[in-house]
Image (cartoon, rainbow, N blue to C red):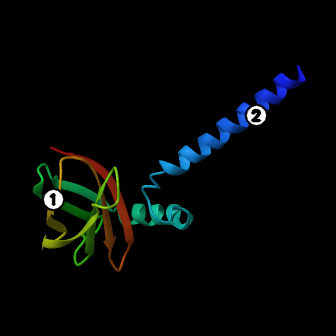
Amino acid sequence: MKRFIYFLYFVFTVLMVITFYYAYKVHDGLIVDHYYEKSLKYFDLKKKEEELGLKFTILKQPVGRHSELVLSINTSMGPLKGARVMLIRGAVSNDKEDKAFVLKEKRAGVYSAVLDFPREGKWYLRLMLDHKLIKTERIWQIDIS
């Protein structure tokens, strides 16, 4: 009986080591960079967004490998003018295909950029907004076909 318990302990230890090794090898990382630091400010930022009435509306979503993204950014005071808006296109499977795009203001509160996708599939889009009133970001996933 004692040998059987030692055997079970040995098997459990080996399986645990294999599990940690496998988890380390296939780790993709987090979607959000520096998540801990950002999480400390999250609720303050969400409160500020709510006070401003910040709203993002996608007017034209990219559908093909070379297509335009058009979005509207509004507050309770009207369109958000003069913001610096950057979008990072990131592949779901790796970070080697990440690319940044600067969105240009077409008219008051409406920003656009032409995005290139090297292949079809699922992509993350991370929109970063920098304005004198607020600095925030949004992340969503799209499927390019």
* Residue at (23% x, 55% y) in the render: 57
* Residue at (27% x, 58% y) in the render: 56
User: For the N terminus, which image quadrant?
Assistant: top right
Q: Amino acid at mark 1?
A: Leu
* Residue at (35% x, 80% y) in the render: 132
Which residue is nearer to you in this view: 19 or 60? 19
**Disc 2 vs disc 1: which is toward the camera?**
2
Position in image of residue 28 (x %, y %): 44, 52
Q: Amino acid at mark 2?
A: Phe
| Residue at the spot of label 1 | 69
Judged left or right of residue 25, residue 85 is: left
**Quadrant of residue 124 in the image?**
bottom left
Position in image of residue 138 (x %, y %): 35, 59
Element on which disc 1 rests: strand
* Residue at (44% x, 59% y) in the render: 32
**Structural crowding at the residue carrying mark 2, measured as other residues with C-alpha within 10 Å and reported as few (<14), some (14–19) or many (≥20):** few
Farthest residue in the front direction?
Answer: 3
**Structural crowding at the residue carrying mark 1, measured as other residues with C-alpha within 10 Å and reported as few (<14), some (14–19) or many (≥20):** some
Q: CA distance from mark 2 to mark 1?
A: 56 Å
Which residue is nearer to you in this view: 87 or 118? 118
* In contact (CB < 8 Å): disc 2 and disc 1: no
User: For the C terminus, which image quadrant?
Assistant: top left
| Residue at the spot of label 2 | 10
Residue 94, above or below 81: above
Which residue is nearer to you in this view: 113 or 48? 113
Residue 81, above or below 76: below
